[in-house]
Amino acid sequence: MKGKVYIYTGDGRGKSPAAIGRAVQEATIGKTVVIIQFLKGKVPENIVFLKKMEPEIKLFRFEKSGENYSELTQEKQKEECRNILNGINFARKVLTTGECDLLVLDEVLGLIANGIITVDELKRLLEVRDETNVIMTGVELTEEISRLADEISRIETVTNSGV
């Protein structure tokens, strides 16, 4: 049976924490999890904590720069693209080998928005999964990407106007 594809999207904060929360839930019931983070820029504090959860949760980042991708020079963006594509190839290997029960591709939708990968490349990546469930996060969600998912969760910012 094919694994499910979940997308956490929207303009609100909390997509990555929701995915990490789901990863922790899976780990607590004996499942193995691989998290690959993209476009994260400065190293978040949660990386140090998540590294303590190995081997149940393994975290990978392939980008070398500490700066946000959008703030890099064109030359550095090209270099980071190569690193990011190494991360995508690693994700393919993880899915092909069935190395984990849950693969989290954090901010992978941002790769499409930045023109680093195409929707077709993402689709081909997802097609190699067997029983592995996949969570993808990102702000921009197109109809074409929506069709790849079994379930979509929208996280929105709602301002409190005092009502």
Image: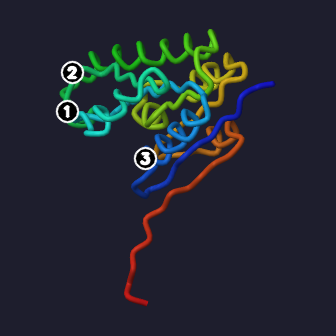
Task: Place residue 73 in its image quadrant.
Answer: top left
- Name the one closer to the observer, 109 or 133: 133
Report the side of 94 relative to 80 (left or right): right
Nearer the camera: disc 1 or disc 2 = 1
Nearer the camera: disc 1 or disc 3 = 3
N-term mark: 1 or 2 = 1
- Residue type, numbered disc 2: Lys
**Disc marking residue 76:** 2
Report the side of 67 relative to 46 (left or right): left
Question: Percent x, y for residue 126?
Answer: 64, 24
Q: Which residue in the structure is indicated by mark 1?
A: 67
Question: Percent x, y for residue 138?
Answer: 47, 43
Residue at the image point whose x is 43% and y is 90% from the top:
163
Q: Label 1 crowding class (10 Å Cα cut-off): few <14, some 14-19, many 20+?
A: some
Q: Tell me if label 1 and label 2 are in contact, CB under 8 Å.
A: yes
Q: Label 3 crowding class (10 Å Cα cut-off): few <14, some 14-19, many 20+?
A: few
Task: Place residue 1 in its image quadrant.
Answer: top right
Q: Which residue in the structure is indicated by mark 3?
A: 17
N-term mark: 3 or 2 = 3
